[in-house]
Image (cartoon, rainbow, N blue to C red):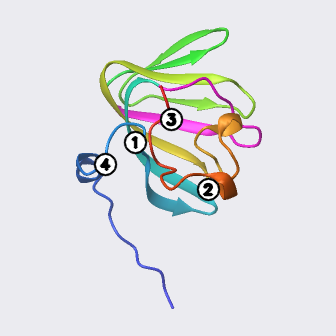
């Protein structure tokens, strides 16, 4: 039995996202996931104990806040955040379309997120303000 192979139209995917900070898995690659996400405003400071994250900016400008300084990531550029590095993604000048690439086990809020068993009914909701 072969797996279905299909083309993902990212433009269409970004149009149907429910809102900012709600990633949608668009592909699975050997235990990793590609996720489309629209960013708006500032997320929360967090880190991931065991996973690296890749942020590929497709549209807009992402400011990746790090404790030792900010990085600016524009369209066609990417940044890899190594495991354990505290970071705060920010889209302060309009929406930013990003393709995330991370292990399927990555929890969205990293060290701040409760274990799966204690989550509420809407794990994709934006972070609390």
Looking at the image, which is closer to me, 37 or 75?
37
Compared with 49, 74 (above or below) is above
From the viewer's perspective, tell me whether residue 82 is left or right of residue 57: right
Spatial separation of the CA atoms under disc 1 and disc 3: 10 Å
Residue 83 placement (x, y as % from top left): 73, 35
| Residue carrying label 2 | 104
Residue 10 placement (x, y as % from top left): 30, 50
Q: Are marks 4 and 1 in contact (CB under 8 Å)?
A: yes
- Nearer mark to the viewer, of 1 and 3: 1
Q: Secondary structure at mark 3?
A: strand
Residue 68's tag is: none
- Upstream in the sequence, badge 4 or badge 1? 4
Q: Quadrant of the rendered structure where residue 57 is?
A: top left
Residue drawn at the location 51% of the way across and 91% of the way down: 1
| Residue carrying label 3 | 55
Spatial separation of the CA atoms under disc 2 and disc 4: 19 Å
- Nearer mark to the viewer, of 4 and 3: 4
Q: How many residues crowd around disc 1 within 10 Å: few (fewer than 14), some, or many (20 or more)?
A: many
Residue drawn at the location 63% of the way across and 46% of the way down: 107
- Upstream in the sequence, badge 1 or badge 2? 1
Residue drawn at the location 67% of the way across and 8% of the way down: 68
Residue 17's tag is: 4
Residue drawn at the location 40% of the way across and 42% of the way down: 37
Q: Are marks 2 and 4 in contact (CB under 8 Å)?
A: no
Q: Is residue 40 magenta?
A: no
Q: How many residues crowd around disc 2 within 10 Å: few (fewer than 14), some, or many (20 or more)?
A: some
Compared with 123, 79 (above or below) is above
Range of residues picked out in magenta? 43-59
């Amino acid at each position: 039995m072969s797996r279905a192979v299909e083309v993902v139209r990212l433009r269409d995917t970004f149009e149907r996202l429910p809102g900012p900070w709600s990633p949608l898995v668009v592909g699975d690659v050997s235990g990793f996931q590609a996720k489309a996400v629209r960013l708006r405003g500032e997320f929360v400071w967090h880190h991931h104990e065991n996973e690296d994250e890749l942020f590929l900016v497709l549209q807009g400008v992402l400011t990746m806040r790090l404790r030792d300084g900010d990085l600016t990531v524009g369209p066609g550029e990417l940044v890899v955040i190594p495991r354990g590095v505290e970071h705060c993604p920010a889209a302060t000048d309009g929406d930013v379309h990003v393709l995330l690439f991370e292990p399927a086990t990555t929890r969205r809020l990293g060290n701040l997120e409760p274990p799966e068993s204690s989550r509420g009914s809407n794990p994709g909701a934006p972070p609390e303000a």
